[in-house]
Amino acid sequence: MTDQTIERQRTVAGIRFHRVGKVYHFEYSEFPELLIGDYVIVETARGRQMGEVVSFNVVEQPDQEHKPIMRVATPRDLVLRHHWELQQDEAMRILRVKAGELSGLDGVKFISAIYNYDGSTLTFLYTAEDKANLNRLHNDLRKAFNAQVEMRQIGPRDVAKLLGGFGACGELRCCSTFLTDFSPISIKMAKMQGISLNPSEITGMCGRLRCCLVYEYETYVEARQKLPKKNKRVGTPQGEGKVIDVMPLQDSVLVLVEEGMIVVRREELVPLDELEALAKKAKAPCDKHGDGPCECGAKPGNAQDADDTEATE
């Protein structure tokens, strides 16, 4: 790699605003001595925020623009952030009092209050089964706090992420420890892995399909493509049988033969249905030339006829 190539590579700083949150990229050319672990102040769609530098990444598209970092956080900024974090519980108490004075909020559940680092913005996170009108509550909160008040609705997965706790596996929830994005999950993933479709087996604490269903899905898909499906006729060392179950991670299938059920590895299987189909196709006449000789794939049975024709010519 030449020096010119190195010079053309522009890097940006990856900044995270929460312990387990998405990473956003900002231009840091004015702060060349910035290090991972440093805290910086940046301008976002929700106002000024303090974030931690967690990575430096090469820009894949040179023309892509990124917002610049405003400045490196000072010790005073860190003290301010700690001070306002301590005020969040009191903000939640006031919110619940104000909400209790109003009607029509029975289906709304308030999750947390979050101040930005300098206390200028206060965001209340809530979840609701149906669309809720929070205009009156919003107006009351704006009068109660000397900050810009925002109300933001979040989904059940985000609620579980904020609350933390343990999953059904006995470990800390994935969403609150390392998952920064929620991948699309479908019931098909559970079926592909042979997991019981009992809701208690595939549903997480958030009431949605478990995030872990996506972890091994591609492995199962790749493994199943190489194995015969259920009810397929196969040949085994113990004779002909029918596939009863597929075991992708063992690269094997459970086959029913005359002696009973046996586990057969993939390399020991003979696909009888496919072989019979190939043999039938080999005996069939050419679709283009019929029963006569042809150069596009004559039948084995017509080889002698072809030789006789050549001899006659």
Image (cartoon, rainbow, N blue to C red):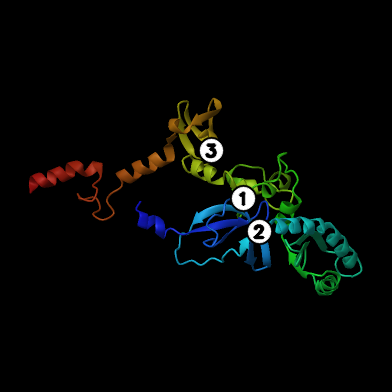
Query: Counting residues from the N terminus, which is met first, the one under dot 1 or under dot 2?
Result: 1
61 relative to 210, above or below: below
Classify residue 303 by image quadrant. Answer: top left
Q: Name the residue that disc number 2 marks.
A: 73
Q: Amino acid at mark 1?
A: Gly
Query: Counting residues from the N terminus, which is met first, the one under dot 2 or under dot 3?
Result: 2
Residue 242: x, y in percent? 52, 35
**Number of numbered discs:** 3
Mark toward the viewer: 1 or 2: 2
Residue 257: x, y in percent? 52, 29
Viewer-closest of 66 and 245: 66
Contact flag, marks 1 and 3 (Cβ < 8 Å): no
Residue 165: x, y in percent? 75, 45
Q: Amino acid at mark 3?
A: Pro
Q: Secondary structure at mark 1?
A: loop
Classify residue 109 by image quadrant. Answer: bottom right
Viewer-closest of 20 and 257: 20
Residue 312: x, y in percent? 8, 46
Q: Name the residue that disc number 3 marks.
A: 248
Q: Amino acid at mark 2?
A: Ala
Image-based side of 169 in relation to 90, left or right: left
Q: Name the residue that disc number 1 marks.
A: 37
At 48% across and 44% down in the image, what residue appears?
Answer: 225
